[in-house]
Image (cartoon, grey):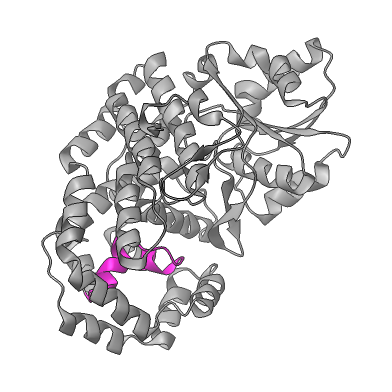
Amino acid sequence: MDFSSCTISDLLDPEGFACSCGKVHRVSLRYVDIAQGAINRIPEMLHKTGVTKPFLIADLCTYEAAGRRVSEILDASHIPFAKYIFQVERPESNECAVGLAAMAFDTSCDGILAVGSGSIGDISKIIARLSGNPLITIATAPSMDGFASPTCSNIVSGLKSTVPGVCPIAIIGDLDVLCSAPTRMLQAGLGDMAAKPNALLEWRLSNLINGEYYCGNVASLMRKSAYQCLSSASGLMNRDPQAVTHIMEGLVMSGIAMAFADTTRPASGIDHYFSHIWDMLALQRGELPDLHGIQVGIGTIYSIQIYEMIKQQKPDSHKARSCMNEFDWQRWQQSIREFLPSAADSIIRQAAAENRFDSQKHASRFQTISQHWDEIVQIIADDLPDLHTVRSQLQSAGAPVSAQEIGISPEILKRTFLTTKDLRNKYMASSLLWDMGLLEEAANKLF
């Protein structure tokens, strides 16, 4: 099946799709309702999913946006439910928030009803996994790509991590609610989708350099969804229902692509790591970070510039060997502790367990890079979006396109770029540059 020609409903076959990549692609999601008035069909959705008593999770903002109305609909339909409302406008998904929701959970409930986007969705996925109950998500803003993903983003021991959750069995996106979302959240959804072509590029590169699993059919699904979203950018400022529908559908498609591939690769690359680091820096200061999609959109602009520079390089064995020979494990640890003290222990522990800076692995990767350099350059040329076009699309929606616009200094921006390779063992632009002995040089040129 050509996934790029499929609608969302086409992709929800519980039997899945046997693919030439060797996987059977399937997603646990069964129902998606993105339309005006969709919230009124919650009783019908509960009946379809077999949920008789949901546990509603929201925060102060999402409860006002949709949670109160959901409660009224449940009461009017004589459907019993319990609820937990975080007494903040924007909870961070971390051990504390998950613990609060878990302690409040009513064990007589047989389903989780997540009213919100972002953190509420992430927290609810974990509660659904821990309780063994199905999850229904009621989106309050088309702001991020994790709606249909089985994983979630959570702060664990200070480190922004991808942790297992559950994929919702149903997603409701009421356009009356979505079109009324704060402008910043609409821009965030666009920023998150802008990153997808670069994520696909990096997925292909890791497949070539590391032999990482890759599926062109899943990539085609993600690519089409991304460009459809970006073409709707100008309509977001007018809260055009069709533009908002395209963004919401694209964000759901993104989660389906991740579920199909059983990896975040189709949707997440170095641009997301810019955002993860800025999240951790803000939390270290006791502040809330900017929205994930806003930061990812900015990271996308920088990642395009990074790959434009990479295209102009040539593998140099002397530079690559010098980089590896000069690497100092103790100095690297000190650098991480200075920049990300709250997450340093987790980062260092993971790097050590993975033997991430092994010289033999480095030499093997560099040999592959050298042998396939023309192919690497061709992949970049094929997949890299046009910088001017992406910048214009984000700006047409009023979204920021530089770190300075969200209060990130040039010094922090440069340090962020250098650190992207260190968070997890995920091969991306900074990893490639480090393997080539060009990371510091690139940072000095670009930032």
Residue 26: x, y in percent? 55, 39
Q: Is residue 246 magenta?
A: no
Task: Identify which residue, 119 or 425, lies in the foreground.
Answer: 425
Tell me the residue at 66%/27% (across/down). 63
Q: Is residue 193 visible?
A: no
Tell me the residue at 56%/34% (across/down). 117
Tell me the residue at 29%/84% (across/down). 324
Residue 160: x, y in percent? 53, 58
Q: Is residue 424 magenta?
A: yes
Q: Is residue 393 left or right of residue 190?
A: left
Q: Is residue 41 left or right of residue 297?
A: right
Q: How many marks?
A: 0
- Magenta segment, principal secondary structure? helix
Task: Identify which residue, 233 or 222, lies in the foreground.
Answer: 222
Query: In the displayed structure, would residue 84 be above or below residue 365?
Result: above
Q: Is residue 269 visible?
A: yes
Task: Identify which residue, 118 or 134, lies in the foreground.
Answer: 134
Query: In the displayed structure, would residue 115 be above or below residue 260?
Result: above
In which image quadrant can residue 90 be found? top right
Residue 377: x, y in percent? 16, 58
- Location of the N terminus by quadrant is top left
Tell me the residue at 89%/35% (across/down). 108
Q: Is residue 368 left or right of residue 357?
A: left
Magenta residues (range): 418-437
Query: In the displayed structure, would residue 299 be above or below residue 186?
Result: below
Query: In the displayed structure, would residue 301 be above or below residue 143?
Result: below
Residue 291: x, y in percent? 46, 42
- Location of the C terminus by quadrant is bottom left
